[in-house]
Image: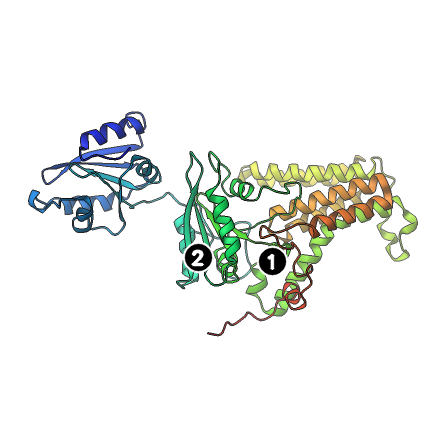
Amino acid sequence: MEFTRNLSDNMNYLNKKLDVDVNFDLVYRTFHIADKEACLYYVEGFTKSDVWQKLMEDFAPITAEDLPANAHDFSKKKLPYSQVGLVADDETMIKMLLAGISCLFIDGYDKCFTLDCRSYPARSVSEPEKDKVLRGSRDGFVETLTFNTALIRRRIRDPKLTVEIMNAGESSHTDIAICYFKGRVDESLLTMIKERIMKLKVDALTMNQESLAECIYPHKWYNPFPKFKYSERPDTAAASLLEGNIIILVDNSPSAMILPSSVFDIIEEADDYYFPPVTGTYLRLSRMIISVLTIYLTPLWLLFMQNPEMIPNWLRFIRLSEEPQVPLIFQLLILEFAIDGLRLAAVNTPSMLTTPLSVIAGIVMGEYSVKSGWFNSETMLYMAFVTVANYSQSSFELGYAFKFIRMILLVLTAFFNVWGFIIGFILSLCAIVFNKTIAGKSYIYPLIPFHVSELKKRFFRGRLPHREK
């Protein structure tokens, strides 16, 4: 519907459309500007009251002779505020109102004045719990989109940094910010991402970034390796932008989606660059080696236990000290599920009970489970290493991808022995090698296609680049 010059008609339509008599947080207030009646619509909790108090003071001295003939002139001459817009239809106005923008109607004008004086509820900008660093900045993304874009702008003060706003969801109309650096971004990938977001046919992005990720990249869901890198650190997002990546920020989500991302991008962390090259290289290589061990350690140990004659003399100490009461494959699989159960319990346990829960879990699942005969001490040792080693990298998605591959390897090794391990090893390689980034490129570049200089950068942390002007 197009707005008319009659304020009463506009108010009657909007009051019925918005159901303002039922919704207590949808507020409208009538007042006068000169001899004209005016009505202000806003959402309680989103509007800065001090801004409107100042505007009311500015409206008071306006006389009938001062009122311009059209809405455009009024917005330029009589609205002393920087973020003012004009809207002519109800659909656009309602979207903006529910996003927190105040909407003003004045009798005699057929346009709605939109004033962006929003004040979103937000928590403090603090260091994220998962993406912690030993050295470096301690700020992190929050659930408010404008705060997140400001954290990136603070680090990159260049007009080539572009932040485009879009929205998705028939009901939610969730704001999505696409950030990129002109001249360094892959233009074809950028165009493809924009087109996919514009063509989204979803009711709401209920799970924020995960909902968006599944919509813009619906293919190969069976491959567990993540297609996106998620980070709650503004410095990581800023560095990725300067490398030519695209950053997607979704309102109500405290993390950034970085794409395209290979497995090497996901394994990298900010600590690699906050320390000197030698230390950064050591941290990076340690993380890569530990990641490989989390996949193959327990399947390889199970293979040796099933074939004791394959154990070299210098590894005789890894043999079981006691005969297992429960088959090793069941011990390992039970512990895999039990560890996830403990993790879920820790997430849902009140902080005051975290310590007692840890003590109970350590005693019951550690000591008593071995004494009861359910588990061998060696099984507990290797699973404890795998559990702790999973936290050596910050990506939950990559950690669970390693877990699924490890469990497939365990099952194949238990049923088909040596050939099962070989088949599982080949499957794990295929899952990585034949995976593609969202840009359609190799997931393990620069290994495939092979690129020597880029490969060195992935494994060895060199000096930070200095771009010449």
Give me the residue at 19% from left, 46% from top: 55
The reply to whether residue 321 is in sight is: no
Q: Are marks 1 and 2 in contact (CB under 8 Å)?
A: no
Label ID, residue 268: 1
Task: Pick whichever of labels 1 and 2 is earlier in the sequence.
Answer: 2
Horizontal side, residue 435 vs residue 34: left or right: right
Which image quarter holds the N terminus?
top left
Residue 396 in the image: state x and y as whole percent: 61, 46
Mark 1 element type: loop
* Residue toward you, 290 or 430: 430
| Position above or below: 24 against 351 | above
Crowd around label 2: few <14 · some 14–19 · many ≥20 (10 Å):
many
- Residue 98 placement: quadrant: top left
Label ID, residue 88: none
- Residue 93 placement: quadrant: top left
Q: Looking at this rendering, what residue extends furthest in the right direction?
A: 309
Residue 90 in the image: state x and y as whole percent: 29, 35
Q: How is the image coloured?
A: rainbow
Residue 178 in the image: state x and y as whole percent: 45, 51
Crowd around label 1: few <14 · some 14–19 · many ≥20 (10 Å):
many
Mark 2 element type: helix
Horizontal side, residue 78 vs residue 167: left or right: left
- Residue type (three-letter) at the residue carrying disc 1: Glu
Residue 141 in the image: state x and y as whole percent: 46, 51
Mark 1 vs mark 2, CA separation in Å: 19 Å
Horizontal side, residue 386 vs residue 103: left or right: right
Mark 2, residue position? 152
- Residue type (three-letter) at the residue carrying disc 2: Ile
Give me the residue at 48% from left, 50% from top: 248
What number of labels is visible? Answer: 2
